[in-house]
Every structure is written in structure tokens, then in C-alpha cells.
Image (cartoon, grey):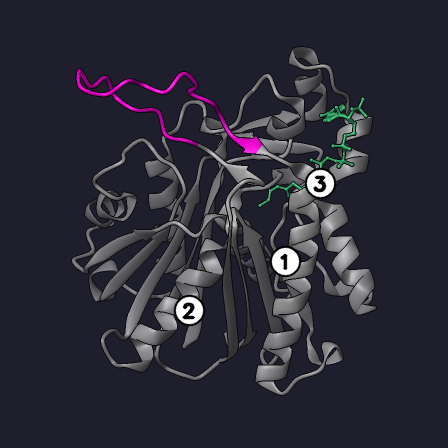
Amino acid sequence: MKIAGTGRAMPSLSVNNDMLSVILDTNDEWISTRTGIRERRILSKERLEDLAVSAARAALVSANVAASDIDYMICSNVINNFVTPSLSCIVQGEIEARCPCLDINAACSGFIYALDLADALLKTGRAHKILVLCAEQPSRMVNWKDRSTCVLFGDGAGAVVLTDESEDFKAFKISTVSKTDPLYYQRAMEYNPFVMLPDSDAPMIMNGKEVFKLAVSSCLSDIKQALSLAGKTVADINYYLLHQANLRIIQSIRELLEISEDKFPHNIERYGNISSASIPVLLDELHEAGTFKKGDTILMSAFGAGFTSGACIVEWSI
Ligand code: COA
């Protein structure tokens, strides 16, 4: 599998920490020192579907691949306007692709899980060109009155076009451990005359400290296993693209691996945590900036609700 092109689309509304301090008992100093986040993008006028379509189109242009040539689409998404049909069905129509489509929900690890699925499809010859799209809107799940969760998240979409032209992916390690309490969001139920509705219709619930610890330990374990599977050392990696959830999580992992800061690019300061879209958006920004050279080895690692996590190693070839 080869990454042939990348794309992203972000909402136009930027909400900085000072704007949050008007509606919440918080301030820029607390948010930026505890998380590294200074602003995030929030969907207001646009729809998530529009963002997803723009990111998909950008990736197709970047790969120089026509939508009609895509033979499979995987969309990673936790929540959107529709329970059904899937977001990928909506995007497929808008971009005029004709391939089978499905959505997956592996929370913030969704990009790595989608890449792993795509790799399997390409290896078996069931597909030759796959669009992986991550489109996320955590702003519709968080409790905007809970300062310990809502300040962390933002919306956005990132995409990649994958082809079977070369074998650039050197290792995958994905894991799931059923630990649902630290982070969950319950869907509200429609009125049903035969069922007593539960009392609570709670927004996202998160135990930040527990998630922090799980994130560091799972990420470290995945990174070490992926390196071992690829026969590489920590020093062989040119760039570590980690899920952008908290700059302190990224720094803790970096310090434990004893690697210099320049190998850990980040954009969390501008976008907050955009769930599974975090890594593809960062990947696209770095690709656009010309950061990667042909032959660079990149390790991507993410974690999220579930508890899910995953890492993969790719050699850059565009
Ligand atoms: N502004 C000001 N104060 C805040 C605040 C905010 N936005 N949010 C929480 N606080 C307060 C708390 O109420 C608490 O006050 P108290 O000591 O009077 O009770 C204090 O700050 C410390 O809170 P604590 O929860 O101990 O902070 P922390 O250092 O653990 O940081 C997180 C909190 C959420 C930033 C951190 O735990 C984290 O990032 N966890 C991982 C979350 C994550 O990544 N989730 C997504 C995974 S995909």
C-alpha cells in the first residue's frame, strides 16, 4: 500500500481560548499549559458532509486519481448528522464515485484502523485504489458547560488516497481493550411507548486522568511493537505523527522514547483534538509544506475511546 495523495478541510469558525473564557470558568493560561491547545475549529455554518467532501476531493486531486477510479471508500466517523445512511454513502454521491462504501467507528484511532483494513483489501487484490476519509464533529457530543472536556475538542476532516502501486507500509499494530468507563457518549433514545426511557441523556463523559495514562501506555506499547515488527529502531523514524489529544501526552511519549522534539510535529495548538481526523489533517499539512522527503520513515500512532489504539510505519514515496 502506498499513500498517493492527502487532503483536508477545516471549518471556518475558529474559537480561541479567550472566547471560551467568556462562556466558561476557564482561561487561556490553564488550557494552553495543560493541553497545548490555543484554538479549535467548530462547525457552525458548514455541515460535516461538506467538509468530508472537500477533504476527499483534495486528496483525489493530490493523488491525481479520478473519483470514478476509486474502488472502495472507508470513512472513519464517530458522529454526524445521520445515524443512517453512513457518511461515506453521502460523500460517494457528492464526489461522484461508484465504489462500495462503509463507515467505521474506532473512535480517535479510526485512521489507523481504516489504513489497516485498506492494506488488507489491497493485499488481497479486492481493491486497487482506496479512499480513506476521517470526518469528525466532536463539538456535537461534548457538554459545552463542562470545562474539563469541551475545551479539548474541535471539528475537521482529513483524507488519503491509497493505491497498491508499492509496498510502503512496513508494519501495523492495532489493539482493543474493552475499557468503556474512561470515555463514552450515550446516544439518546427516541420515544417508544413500550419502553421506559432512561433518566439521563448525558453528553460525553470522560475521566481525563485515566485517559491520559491509558493513552501514554498504549501508544508506547504500540510504537515499540510496530518498530519491532518492521525491524526498526526508535532512531530510524524520521517523523512521529501522534494523535493530537494533548501536547503533554505527546511530550510524555517523546520523553520516554528519548527522541528530539523536531521529530514530533504537531498542530494541536490550532485545532485541538479532532478525533480520527487528527493524524490525516497533520499528514496533509506536512505534505503540503514539503516536510517529507522521499524515503522518510513515518510512524503514526493513535488512541481513543474503547479503549482502542494503533500504530503503523510507512515509508514516504511521493
Ligand atoms: N479551566 C480551568 N480549570 C479547569 C479546566 C478548565 N478548562 N478543566 C478542569 N479544570 C480544573 C479542575 O476542575 C480541577 O480543579 P480542582 O483541582 O479544583 O478540582 C483542576 O483544573 C485540575 O484538573 P485535573 O483534571 O486534575 O487536570 P489535569 O492536569 O488532569 O488535566 C485534562 C485535565 C483533561 C487536560 C487531562 O487529564 C487530559 O488531557 N486527559 C486526556 C484527555 C484526552 O486526551 N481525551 C481524549 C482521548 S482521545
Span colored in magenta = 186-205
Residue 297: percent from the left, percent from the top? 62, 76
Residue 29 visible from this viewpoint: yes
Q: How far apart are marks 1 and 3 (CA)?
A: 19 Å
Question: What's the residue type where badge 3 is placed?
Answer: Lys
Left or right, 164 with respect to 149, comes to: left
Amino acid found under the numbered disc labelled 1: Leu
Q: Give the percent coordinates (x, y) of residue 195.
A: 23, 21
Q: Which residue corresponds to the image point at 71% horizontal and 40% vertical from the top-left? A: 209
Would you name the residue on which mark 2 appears? 116
Q: Which residue is drawn at 78% across and 68% down?
A: 257
Ligand 1 is found in which quarter of the picture? top right
**Percent coordinates x, y for residue 118 in the rendering:** 35, 69
* Residue highlighted by disc 3: 209
Q: Residue at x 35, y 66 (%)?
A: 64
> Can you tell which mark lies on residue 42?
none
Residue 26 x/y as whole percent: 74, 19
Q: Main secondary structure of the magenta part?
A: loop
SS for dot 3: helix
Pointer 1 or 3: first along the chain: 3
Q: Say what secondary structure mark 2 lies in.
A: helix
Kindly identify which residue carries mark 1.
Answer: 242
Mark 1 Cβ inside 8 Å of ligand 1: no
Q: Kindly identify the amino acid type of the residue bearing the numbered disc 2.
A: Asp
- Determine if the C-beta at disc 3 is less than 8 A from ligand 1: yes
